[in-house]
Amino acid sequence: MGIIAFIVIGLIAGLIARAILPGKQSMGLIATTLLGMVGSLVGGLVGSLFQRDGRLFDVRPSGIIMSVIGAIVVLLLVGAAGRRRVHA
């Protein structure tokens, strides 16, 4: 997968993750893209544990779904870390 496709899929995954999770996430477009890209890496690595065929960076519908799930997990972790830091 090319870098442009990785950025576009990261943007889409980040936007979907932010739309799914309720609450206020004060992120711009670049932070949303980075969120989706990190989520794509997390989701791709988790997905590769269950699927052994093909290359790791092939674009598949299941990979896009795992990218969104990974972005949601990363967004939850960032939100939890931010809340813990404010209350401490």
Image (spheres, helix red, strand yellow):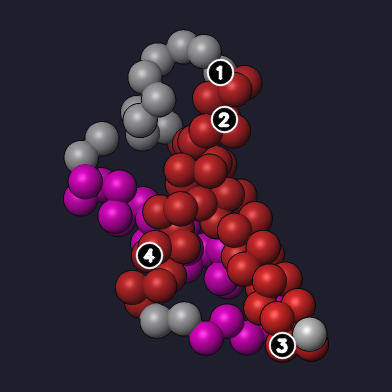
Circles 4, 2 touching at the beta carbon (< 8 Å): no
> In the image, is 47 to the left or to the right of 81?
left
Circles 2, 1 touching at the beta carbon (< 8 Å): yes
Residue 51's tag is 1
Instruction: Check disc 2 and report the residue beneath it.
Output: 47
Instruction: Check disc 4 and report the residue beneath it.
Output: 33
Tell me the distance, in whole angstroms, between the alpha carbons under discs 2 and 1.
6 Å
Q: Is residue 8 magenta?
A: yes
Classify mark 3: helix, strand or loop.
helix
Please name whichever residue, 81 or 50, is drawn nearer the observer in this view of the structure.
81
Q: Residue at x 62, y 86 (%)?
A: 24
Tell me the distance, in whole angstroms, between the alpha carbons under discs 2 and 3.
33 Å
Compare marks 4 and 3 and give the one earlier in the sequence.
4
Residue located farthest toward the front when viewing the structure as drawn: 88
Circles 2, 3 touching at the beta carbon (< 8 Å): no
Compare marks 1 and 4 and give the one earlier in the sequence.
4
Compare marks 1 and 3 and give the one earlier in the sequence.
1
Q: Which quadrant of the figure contains the N terminus?
A: top left
Identity of the amino acid at label 4? Thr
Instruction: Check disc 3 and report the residue beneath it.
Output: 86
Classify mark 2: helix, strand or loop.
helix
